[in-house]
Amino acid sequence: MYTKHMDNRKIEIRELEAKNLSVTKTRNKLLEGLGENLFKRIGEQEPFDTNAADTPGVLLEEYRNLLKDIDESLASITSLEKELVRIKELEETIAVKAAEESRLEEELQEFHEEIGKTLLEDADYHDATGAVRRQEENLLARIHEQETKLEELESQTGGFFSWLGRNAQMTVSKTVLSKNRSALRKLYRDVGKKYLLAEPDSVVNGAINTSAERARELEEHLSSLSTELSARRGERRMLEDQFGVEGSPSRRIQGLEKHITLVKGKFPAIHFGMGVLAAEKRVLVSSFLSAEDDPVLEEAGFLKTELAQNELKIEKLKTAIKIDNEKNEIEKMKKAINSHEDKIAAAKKAITEIKNQISDTEQTIQELQTFLNNNADT
């Protein structure tokens, strides 16, 4: 009887609860928008007491703290982005300058080698011990020997195994030849560098002096370039060391962006709180309310009344269901009583029957005892 009624009421409760959820969302959205507009109108003013609880001043202080937090995080992101750009600029500059340095060093070595070779070819070049000229002659002889050997090997013919052996010998000779040529170039460079460091007053020949002048220009350029590279690398190292302590810029930027998102997520509650104060304690923010807020406040009041009415309906339905539940319990208990009473009546009947059986049995015993007594002497 009650089950059908209860089911209908439960369906109605669910419908009312769903409706209230929708109404609550609508009202909250209205009050959030109202609160956000009020914060914008307040701006930089200080119209409230921030020390008293449950006042607009407390919400205003929290609102401004959130804005400050976001501004500081954005400033940190901007700073980190500038540092990232600076590091990229430094890396590009360092790469260009390093490439230029490498090119100029190769060019300088070529001038050193050219000067050294020219000096050793000049009969007037003074070599006190003659050691350098002997090194040159020794290396030239080795080079000539390996070049001759290679020519001979290349001209040889033969079978497959001869070809394998010849190729192995040629590989060794080419390696030795390459080392001797490198050693000769180094010897010329050393001679050229020593000449430039000595800065001789006497002119050996015009060609050397022209090369020497160009080499000294390159050395000055390289010195300036090295100083600039050292400064750029030092700046980059300083920035990278800083990032090494605090974490990579990209990761820190991601962390700050995530933090900003979390902070922004707190604004709806703050806006709603201010909207609630405007709707329920209008006098506290009346100086910032305008005629355009009246429809919002009126609608919010209507929705609040609707929510209260629906809540009352829900409570009444739940109360009716509880009453029916209690009635059902009473019916169950009455049935239980009836069941127990039937069992009691059956038990009483069984007891009476057992008593009668006992009485009959006792009568039989008495009769049997009398028989025994009468025939005791027989």
Image (cartoon, grey):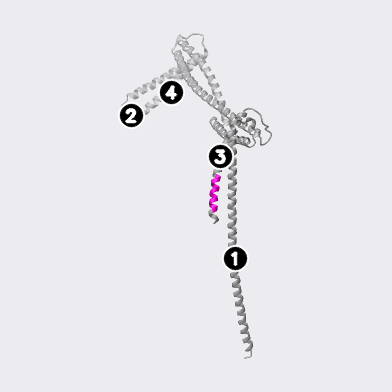
Residue 207 at x, y percent in the picture: 45, 10
Q: Amino acid at mark 1?
A: His
Mark 1 closeness class: few <14, some 14–19, many ≥20 residues within 10 Å = few
Image quadrant holding the C terminus, namely bottom right
Q: Amino acid at mark 4?
A: Lys
Residue 82 at x, y percent in the picture: 55, 25
Mark 2 closeness class: few <14, some 14–19, many ≥20 residues within 10 Å = some
Dot 3 or dot 2, earlier in sequence: 3
Q: Which mark is residue 25?
A: 3
Q: Tag 1's secondary structure?
A: helix
User: How far apart are the alpha carbons under marks 4 and 1?
Assistant: 119 Å
Task: From the viewer's side, name the closer residue of 97 and 8.
Answer: 8
Q: Tag 3's secondary structure?
A: helix
User: How far apart are the alpha carbons under marks 3 and 4?
Assistant: 86 Å
Q: Are marks 3 and 2 in contact (CB under 8 Å)?
A: no
Disc 2 designates what residue? 163
Q: Amino acid at mark 2?
A: Trp
Dot 2 or dot 1, earlier in sequence: 2
Q: Which residues are magenta?
A: 5-17
User: How far apart are the alpha carbons under marks 3 and 1?
Assistant: 55 Å
Residue 95 at x, y percent in the picture: 49, 23
Disc 1 designates what residue? 340
The vertical placement of 9 against 60, above or below, is: below
User: How far apart are the alpha carbons under marks 3 and 2?
Assistant: 93 Å
Residue at 60% across, 56% down: 326
Dot 3 or dot 1, earlier in sequence: 3
Please indicate whether residue 325 sits to the left or right of residue 122 in the image.
Answer: right
Residue at 56% across, 30% down: 244
Q: Tag 2's secondary structure?
A: helix
Predominant SS of the magenta segment: helix
Q: Amino acid at mark 3?
A: Lys
Task: From the viewer's side, name the closer residue of 213 and 265.
Answer: 265
